[in-house]
Structures are given as structure tokens and as C-alpha cells.
Image (cartoon, rainbow, N blue to C red):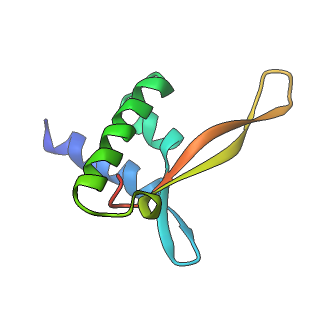
């Protein structure tokens, strides 16, 4: 992979970071597109593998992967809830 691509992806990753009460986290829905996953279901499979790796490293999965919901706009001008996952830097 070219260095410029890596630098751009890293920049997008860092810009997608949220801070809640001093804890950094990323929205899996936002990382999905940054990492090139077109389907949520495929990205959830990758996240589930990361959860297994976290367990195998004797880390508490719930400390790094938190199920959340977020509101998204729909075509009619309204909003609806979608599932999301808050990921720590370790989870990412």
C-alpha cells in the first residue's frame, strides 16, 4: 500500500474519533466506510472476530465494544434508530 494512502486512512481514522468523559471511541458505522466495507453485516463479522481476539487476550470485551444506537436520516426527512458499536482504540 502506498504511503500516501496509509497517511490518508490514518487521518480519516483519527478524525472519526469521539471523546466521551475522557474516553476515546469510534463509531463502527463510521469506520465501516473508512475501511471499505460496503455492507454492515460484513463489518459486523470482522468486529465479532475482533471480540474473540479480545477475549483470547484476556481483555474484557465490554470494556472495548459497547452496543449503542444512533439516529440516521431517512428519505422522508424523518429519522430512525440503527444499531452501532462504540469501539475503543484497542478494539479498532
Q: Nearer the viewer, residue 60 or 23?
A: 60
Query: x, y percentage for residue 92?
Result: 35, 52
Residue at the image position 62 percent from the left and 50 percent from the top: 68
Q: In the picture provided, is 45 more to the left or to the right than 29? A: left
* 38 shown above or below 16: above
Residue 13 image offset from top left, x and y in percent:
38, 51
Residue 63 percent coordinates (x, y): 44, 64
Q: Which residue does the image show at 42% across and 60% down from the upper left?
A: 64
Residue at screen point 58% across, 42% down:
84
Q: Residue furthest bottom?
A: 22
Residue 59 position in % (x across, y down): 31, 63
Q: Is residue 75 above or below residue 90?
A: above
Number of labels in the image equals: 0
Residue in the foreground of this view, choosing between 47 and 37: 47
Split into 4 quadrants, where in the image is the N terminus? top left
Image position of 67 with respect to 88: above or below: above
In the rendered image, the vertical position of residue 15 relative to residue 51, given as above or below: below
Task: From the viewer's perspective, tell me whether residue 55 is left or right of residue 25.
Answer: left
* In the image: residue 79, left or right of residue 5: right
Amino acid at each position: 500500500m502506498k504511503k500516501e494512502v496509509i497517511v490518508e486512512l490514518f487521518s480519516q481514522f483519527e478524525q472519526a474519533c469521539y471523546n466521551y468523559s475522557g474516553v476515546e471511541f469510534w463509531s463502527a458505522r463510521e469506520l465501516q466506510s473508512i475501511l471499505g466495507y460496503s455492507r454492515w453485516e460484513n463489518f459486523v463479522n470482522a468486529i465479532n472476530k475482533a471480540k474473540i481476539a479480545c477475549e483470547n487476550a484476556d481483555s474484557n470485551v465490554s470494556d472495548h465494544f459497547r452496543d449503542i444506537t444512533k439516529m440516521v436520516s431517512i428519505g422522508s426527512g424523518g429519522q430512525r434508530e440503527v444499531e452501532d458499536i462504540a469501539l475503543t482504540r484497542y478494539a479498532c
